[in-house]
Image (spheres, helix red, strand yellow):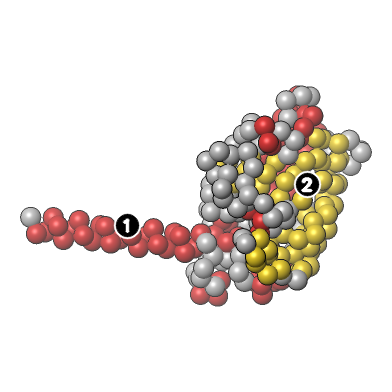
């Protein structure tokens, strides 16, 4: 009987330690120089660990600069932080002009979101655009990143501050191809066969890099855009 209790105690302890390590790595609380994770490479991410590798950028400005400056898949530069007040503000953010060969105008967004966006466009959006539509994407239009507000469109989480309040989210609305054609989430999610196929495929792939990836299928508030963020929650719909 004592042996059973001893083994049960050890199992509980091991499970507790594993859960603690999972949370610590997921939140990026350990500086990258103290972890066994390989550094994030936007050219060839490590699929199983990419979420934790992205999380390491959350608080580490030096690592953020290193990842961005060493890559040809993103054009970005650090932007000044904004002190947090009433749950709103940002730190370790960057201004982004190009990801994966596509122009995009982002005044400020958390470094880990910018890196996730670059991975998504480089490794998924562009290959799928060429395969399905026969054209690469040259421009990505967004509705913005920072907005000091609570979550919209959810009865359960309506009292919770949005990830937009800390520039930890981005809303993507349209994609322009090399031939000038625009692919719109609002118009083509349920419309033209190839365009809809493209949008649904890239949304599904976004779940590899963003913890929350919402499409028009989620609710009416997202009828015209994809919402991506790297907050605490996990959802792909």
Q: Where is the N terminus found, in terms of image quarters?
A: bottom left
* Residue name at image x 77 percent, y 29 percent: 188
Of marks 2 and 1, the one in the foreground:
2
The vertical placement of 223 against 99, above or below, is above
Q: Nearer the viewer, residue 73 or 190?
A: 190
> In the image, residue 98 lies at what x, y percent?
82, 56
Q: Earlier in the sequence, mark 2 or mark 1?
A: 1
* Residue name at image x 61 percent, y 60 percent: 87
Q: Nearer the viewer, residue 230 or 50?
A: 230
Q: Quadrant of residue 192?
A: top right
Left or right relative to 53: residue 43: right
Q: Quadrant of residue 201?
A: top right
Crowd rating for badge 1 (residues with CA inside 10 Å; few <14, some 14–19, many 20+) = few
Q: Quadrant of residue 168?
A: bottom right
Label 1 belongs to which residue?
A: 15
Q: What SS does tag 1 mark?
A: helix
Q: What SS does tag 2 mark?
A: strand
Q: How many marks?
A: 2
CA distance for labels 2 and 1:
42 Å
* Residue name at image x 33 percent, y 60 percent: 16
* Residue name at image x 42 percent, y 63 percent: 21
The vertical placement of 92 against 150, above or below, is below
> In the image, residue 163 lies at what x, y percent?
63, 53
Label 2 belongs to which residue?
A: 143
């Amino acid at each position: 009987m004592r042996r059973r209790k001893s083994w049960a105690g050890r199992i509980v302890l091991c499970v507790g330690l594993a859960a603690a390590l999972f949370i610590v790595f997921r939140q990026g609380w350990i500086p990258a120089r103290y972890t066994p994770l390989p550094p994030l490479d936007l050219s060839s991410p490590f699929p199983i660990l990419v979420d934790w590798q992205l999380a390491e950028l959350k608080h580490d400005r030096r690592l953020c600069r290193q990842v961005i400056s060493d890559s040809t898949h993103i054009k970005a530069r650090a932007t000044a932080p904004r002190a947090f007040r009433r749950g709103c503000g940002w730190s370790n953010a960057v201004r982004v002009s190009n990801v994966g060969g596509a122009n995009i105008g982002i005044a400020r967004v958390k470094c880990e979101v910018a890196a996730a966006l670059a991975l998504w466009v480089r490794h998924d959006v562009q290959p799928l655009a060429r395969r399905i539509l026969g054209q690469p994407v040259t421009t990505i239009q967004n509705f913005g990143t920072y907005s000091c507000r609570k979550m919209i469109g959810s009865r359960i989480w309506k009292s919770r501050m949005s990830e937009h309040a800390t520039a930890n989210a981005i809303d993507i609305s349209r994609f322009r191809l090399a031939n000038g054609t625009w692919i719109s989430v609002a118009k083509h999610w349920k419309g033209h066969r190839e365009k809809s196929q493209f949008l649904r495929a890239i949304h599904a792939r976004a779940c590899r890099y963003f913890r929350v990836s919402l499409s028009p299928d989620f609710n009416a508030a997202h009828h015209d855009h994809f919402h991506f963020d790297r907050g605490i929650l996990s959802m792909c719909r």
